[in-house]
């Protein structure tokens, strides 16, 4: 999809990009630079006003830049179900099974996600379910390797597997670190009972139990 963004209406740009993401559609923004003699609104379309000057400071439309610079998957080692970016959170669930359901992708291949620093100036944190992060913390290119799944037929001597992976990128919180996803307890599944612990016996409180003394004949005989 081409020629989007020729406006300063940021909400319109964001909505169009979100719809393109949901449909796995690539897009091209119009226009990167101004000074177009065929345009009647040069400054309203350009991201960089003057291409002859460095793309910094007042020469950049800093309001439009964050609307266009969103995280996106450059390479997916599988079949993406969707990808979306809203309110600083990027999500990418994908399956390592091929789209035609004939085998899976080779285990160990990397998924590469572009993470623009302009969206995460303070860094980002990653949550992965069914995979591992293989890139350095805060890298502009986030790489993920899915965990091995079910084995399928052999292809050129390599074992093919199929599994699922879910990736989420969000703004880095203070004191947070990148960590793999932890499985949570599912509702409705009973937990294993914990063993009951009893206190150790206290010898000072133990009493010896003795049977009562038998009644004597005098005590047992009725009165005259």
Image (tube, helix red, strand yellow):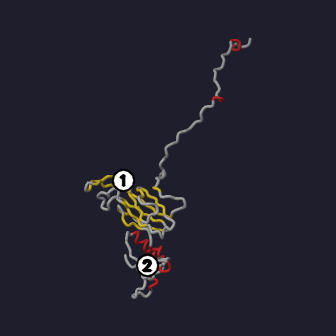
Q: Which residue is mark 2?
A: 5
Picture layout, residue 31 above or below residue 74:
below
Q: Is residue 203 left or right of residue 149?
A: right
Q: Residue 25 location in percent, x, y?
A: 37, 71
Q: Which residue is mark 1?
A: 148
Picture layout, residue 108 above or below residue 3:
above
Mark toward the start of the polypeptide (2 vs 1): 2
Q: In this view of the protein, which residue sits in the foreground, 121 or 168?
A: 121
Q: Dot 1 lies on which element?
A: loop
Q: Residue 96 location in percent, x, y?
A: 35, 58
Q: Is residue 203 left or right of residue 116?
A: right
Q: Which mark is residue 81?
A: none
Residue at figure coordinates x 49%, y 64% from the top left:
123
Q: Residue 17 location in percent, x, y?
A: 43, 73
Q: Residue furthest right?
A: 224
**Residue 100 lies in what quarter of the image?**
bottom left
């Amino acid at each position: 999809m081409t020629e989007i963004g020729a406006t300063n209406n940021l909400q319109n740009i964001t909505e169009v990009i979100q719809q393109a993401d949901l449909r796995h559609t690539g897009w091209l923004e119009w226009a990167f630079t101004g000074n177009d003699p065929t345009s009647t609104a040069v400054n309203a379309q350009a991201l960089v006003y003057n291409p002859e000057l460095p793309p910094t400071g007042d020469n950049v439309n800093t309001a439009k830049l964050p609307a266009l610079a969103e995280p996106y998957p450059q390479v997916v080692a599988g079949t993406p179900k969707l990808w979306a970016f809203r309110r600083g959170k990027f999500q990418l669930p994908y399956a390592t099974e091929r789209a035609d359901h004939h085998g899976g992708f080779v285990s160990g291949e990397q998924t590469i996600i572009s993470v623009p620093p302009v969206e995460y100036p303070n860094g980002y944190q990653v949550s992965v379910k069914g995979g591992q992060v293989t890139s350095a913390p805060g890298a502009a290119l986030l790489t993920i390797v899915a965990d091995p799944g079910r084995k399928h037929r052999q292809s050129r001597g390599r074992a093919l597997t199929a599994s699922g992976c879910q990736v989420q990128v969000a703004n880095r919180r203070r004191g947070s670190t990148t960590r793999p996803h932890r499985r949570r307890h599912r509702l409705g599944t009973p937990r294993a009972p914990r063993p009951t612990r009893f206190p150790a016996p206290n010898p000072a409180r133990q009493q010896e139990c003795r049977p009562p003394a038998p009644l004597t004949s005098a005590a047992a005989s009725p009165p005259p």
